[in-house]
């Protein structure tokens, strides 16, 4: 009845006897509470957030629905363990393309221990976190029935440079992308995924507006999950493109200060996405055609 | 003919045989080129920026005017030394109140050496840089003819907490502030200094709009100088409130990435200033009166 999520692109994966999240057929996602305190911190966040009346309705949609906790046989065979029960964000998706983008130019926070800060700082400098204000933590891009997904290994994702990130953001919305090919990504889906009144860019801008003002929470080391139903798109239907915030093990109280770290990284991502959209407009003006 | 700037609130000061900037009667500010490479980096920035046609006109006003370089007898008696010649931002001011606010949640940059990064990181954590996204690096608040200025010593400024910063931003625009007094700052000048169409908040928002888009420069370790003519205000005239960006020894090329570090800190400062203005509005609504 419980199974390993098919479309998980980052984080601990429940295979080879390891501890990881599970899903069921009813569209729920079960995240095991880890022993190191991170699990209970994340649970506390969900409890506090889900009853926090200061969070506006239009912002709530960016968070997975929280259903409480449940004791469940853990995926590592260690017996019963409490799991946080959440909405499975990919349950009604057919072959979705997904990016997990960890936001912020630092993943540490001033209150953390020196050792933790040093560990995070090293990783932030080794990835694009420090330079870009975000890093891609995982992704899958659906190609076709024949080729399936491009889902680069963790090592490869961790070695992404600024240029790789720029390129992945283009491949994510391209029709001519295939693994190993050197074709310039055509970004031909960008206006239908990134653009439009319900597209990714508008959602990011809506989030940004909240982050310019909200001083409730600081979302350290959280990710934006960006996903759309690639198969719908290939079949000519309008894909539902979504942005969700996930991974709240390091959320702290805002104490009257905005989350400038998240906001800065979010603005950097917005700039990258905007540039893909505007470069497309320019090239279609030049060629005198409209976007496909 | 050359003298030590009367209203310098941060940085090296040209007293006791030390090397520091000088001013003259014509409204120019002479900043000595330091030997450690920072001086020439700052000079390169001014040269490149002043001829950069990609910088919009409305943004140029936030930067001191650059007049080139000049060989000058250095203030430390070491002989002739090149100085960067700039506009003296306080030359036409009578008893100005001034804050030097260093923007960004980090003062280091990924390309720097490990030793430099560690040094900066320590200072960023010891001050409000890491927590707030900015720190006050120096200030003076004019009180009255009798009391003169409150100009806290460097040590005191360096020990400012989040609460001190919040309090200084209120004292800066209060009529009832005096050193050593525990009176709650009335913020009675805030609508005329922070508020209004030519006020500090509007200028910060104008800058923010540029920073959301510009990928030309990364302004590491730069300050916003926020100043107004307190004496004019006390005499019933409208004070000219200004925001200027200064200190460009650590500016790097943006390479197509927005300066998310500066932008995040700027948004944090904007939130603090906005809150002072909105708390004032609320209290005047409650008391049924208009602001004085």
Image (cartoon, coloured by chain):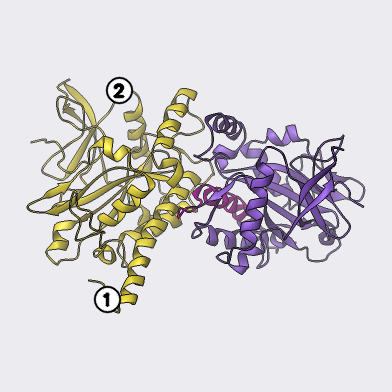
Chain colours: A yellow, B purple
Considering depth in this image, is B247 or B6 the residue closer to the camera?
B247
Q: Position of residue B244 (x, y in %)?
A: 68, 56
Which image quadrant: the N terminus of chain A? Answer: top left
Residue A169 in the image: x percent, y percent?
31, 54
Chain designation of label 2: A
Q: CA distance from mark 1 to mark 2?
A: 54 Å
Q: Tell whether B257 sits left or right of A81.
A: right
- The percent position of residue B156, horizontal first and vertical second, equals 74, 33
Which chain letter matches label 1?
A
Q: Secondary structure at mark 1?
A: loop
Tell me whether the residue at label 1 lies in contact with that at label 2, contact meaning CB atoms closer than 8 angstroms.
no
Residue A183: quarter of image: bottom left
Q: Give the labeled residue for mark 1.
A: A290
- Please determine whether, in this image, residue B141 is positioned above or below residue B120: below
How crowded is the residue under tag 1: few (<14 C-alpha within 10 Å), some, or many (20+)? few
- Give me the disc on residue B194: none
The vertical placement of A41 against B260, above or below, is above
Q: Which residue is painted at 10% across and 50% down in the image?
A: A147
Q: Which residues are magenta?
A: B255-275
Viewer-closest of B138 and A178: A178
Residue where numbered disc 2 is placed: A35
Q: Is residue B266 magenta?
A: yes
Q: Position of residue A39 (x, y in %)?
A: 31, 29
The quarter in which the C terminus of chain A is drawn is bottom left
Q: Is residue B15 magenta?
A: no
**Residue positioned 36% across, 34% down in the render:** A249
Query: If you read the primary sequence from the N terminus, does the residue marked by circle 1 or circle 2 appear first?
Result: 2
Dominant secondary-structure state across the stretch colored magenta:
helix
Residue pictured at 18% horizontal, 44% vertical? A7
Left/right placement of residue A83 relative to residue B134 reads left
């Amino acid at each position: 009845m419980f199974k390993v999520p098919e479309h998980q692109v980052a984080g601990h994966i429940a295979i080879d006897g390891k501890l990881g999240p599970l899903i069921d057929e009813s569209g729920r996602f079960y995240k095991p509470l880890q022993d190191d305190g991170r699990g209970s911190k994340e649970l506390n966040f969900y409890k506090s957030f889900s009853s926090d009346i200061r969070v506006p309705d239009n912002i709530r949609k960016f968070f997975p629905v929280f259903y409480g906790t449940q004791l469940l046989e853990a995926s590592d065979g260690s017996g019963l363990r409490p799991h946080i029960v959440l909405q499975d964000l990919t349950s009604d998706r057919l072959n979705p393309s997904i990016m997990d983008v960890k936001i912020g130019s630092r993943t540490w926070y001033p209150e953390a221990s020196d050792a933790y800060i040093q560990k995070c700082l090293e990783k932030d400098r080794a990835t694009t976190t420090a330079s870009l204000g975000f890093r891609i933590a995982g992704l899958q891009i659906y190609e076709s029935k024949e080729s399936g997904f491009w889902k680069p290994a963790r090592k490869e994702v961790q070695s992404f440079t600024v240029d790789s990130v720029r390129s992945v953001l283009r491949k994510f919305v391209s029709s001519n992308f295939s693994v190993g090919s050197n074709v310039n990504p055509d970004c031909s889906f960008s206006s239908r995924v990134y653009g439009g009144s319900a597209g990714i860019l508008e959602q990011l801008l809506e989030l940004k507006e909240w982050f310019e003002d909200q001083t409730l929470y600081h979302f350290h080391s959280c990710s934006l999950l960006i996903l759309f139903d690639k198969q719908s798109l290939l079949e000519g239907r309008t894909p539902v493109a979504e942005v969700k915030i996930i991974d709240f093990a390091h959320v702290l109280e805002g104490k009257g200060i905005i989350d400038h770290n998240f906001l800065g990284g979010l603005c950097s991502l917005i700039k990258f996405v905007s540039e893909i959209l505007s470069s497309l407009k320019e090239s279609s003006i030049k060629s005198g055609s409209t976007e496909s």
